[in-house]
Image (cartoon, grey):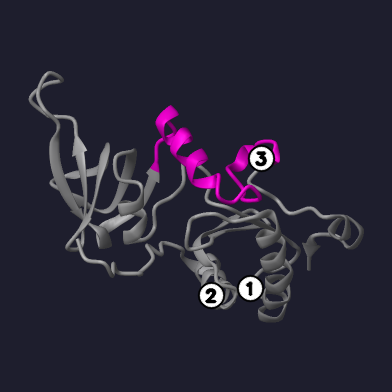
Amino acid sequence: MTDALPSTRLARETGPAARIAALAEPVLDGMGFRLVRVKLIGGTVQVMAERPDGTFTIDDCEKFSRAFSPVLDVNDVMSGRYHLEVSSPGIDRPLVRAQDFEDWAGHEVKLEMAVPQAGRKRFKGELEGYSDGEVRLFIENPEGANKEPVLIGVPFADIGEAKLTLTDELIEAAKARLKSNPNAVADASDFDGEINPLETEDDEEEGNDNG
């Protein structure tokens, strides 16, 4: 493995979501954060972001939300009213950079390929890591459950979506990482099952919807 892994993000946004991602990235970079992904659900703009160490505090969410809302308004990406939600990646997080696959090696992952590999679009197994442009994982042996898992590699650039599988081991690992930052957002459950929406008192008075 090399010390300097590619920083390219698996950017699969299209249409307005891609435009929003392009606007969000420089704002996040300027704050020392990085973009994980953007999703549009109806009139809701969901921006998932993190610090380089994978954490993202409630204060971070609020800071970015207040900086980015005017950018969205000025660029008029959304037609009509919209609601901005900013979240941390959560425990069963998406993996979008080479470093993510290294950081979470040893945990279960699900891959959805944008380009099929050997006729398959979906893979599930234990993440081994990243090497030479490939994501490597141990998958179930096609010869039977009693056989040793098979190590395969799929091109990083051909992955459509990668996400950790929620397990007890993953929860414990995530808790251990967060001990050094008690203010960090641990997962979406911190916000009663919602995707970490920002609703401060100011937002309630002024309206977090825009349009």
Residue 100 found in image quarter: bottom left
Q: Which residue is drawn at 53% across and 62% down?
A: 51
The amino acid type of the residue labelled 2 equals Asp
Q: Is mark 3 on a helix, strand or loop?
A: helix
Q: Does the magenta stretch include residue 176?
A: yes
Compare marks 3 and 2 and give the one earlier in the sequence: 2
* Amino acid type assigned to the residue bearing label 3 in the image: Asp
Q: Mark 3 points at which residue?
A: 190
In this view, the residue farthest toward the top is: 146
**Is the C terminus in the top left, top right, bottom left or bottom right quadrant?**
bottom right
Quadrant occupied by the N terminus: bottom left
Q: Left or right: where does residue 196 sit relative to residue 33?
A: right
Magenta segment: does it hold 155? no
The residue under label 1 is 77
Binning the other alpha carbons within 10 Å of mark 2 as few (below 14), some (14 to 19) or many (20 upward) gives few
- Please name whichever residue, 81 or 146, is drawn nearer the observer in this view of the structure: 146
Q: Residue at x 26, y 59 (%)?
A: 156
Residue identified by numbered label 2? 29
The residue mark sitting in front, 1 or 2, is 2
Q: Extreme bottom residue here?
A: 74
User: Magenta region: which residues?
Assistant: 164-193
Q: What element carries label 1?
A: loop
Q: Is residue 27 above or below residue 193?
A: below
Task: Describe residue 121's horizontal placement relative to residue 148 as left or right.
Answer: right
Q: How crowded is mark 3: few (under 14 residues within 10 Å), some or many (20 or more)?
A: few
Q: Earlier in the sequence, mark 1 or mark 2?
A: 2
Residue 4 position within the rendered picture, expressed as x and y whole percent measured from the top left: 28, 70
Q: Nearer the viewer, mark 1 or mark 3?
A: 3
Q: Which residue is drawn at 49% across and 55% down?
A: 54
Q: Do the residues labelled 1 and 3 touch (CB within 8 Å)?
A: no
Identified by mark 1, the residue type is Val
Residue 173 placement, left or right of 26:
left
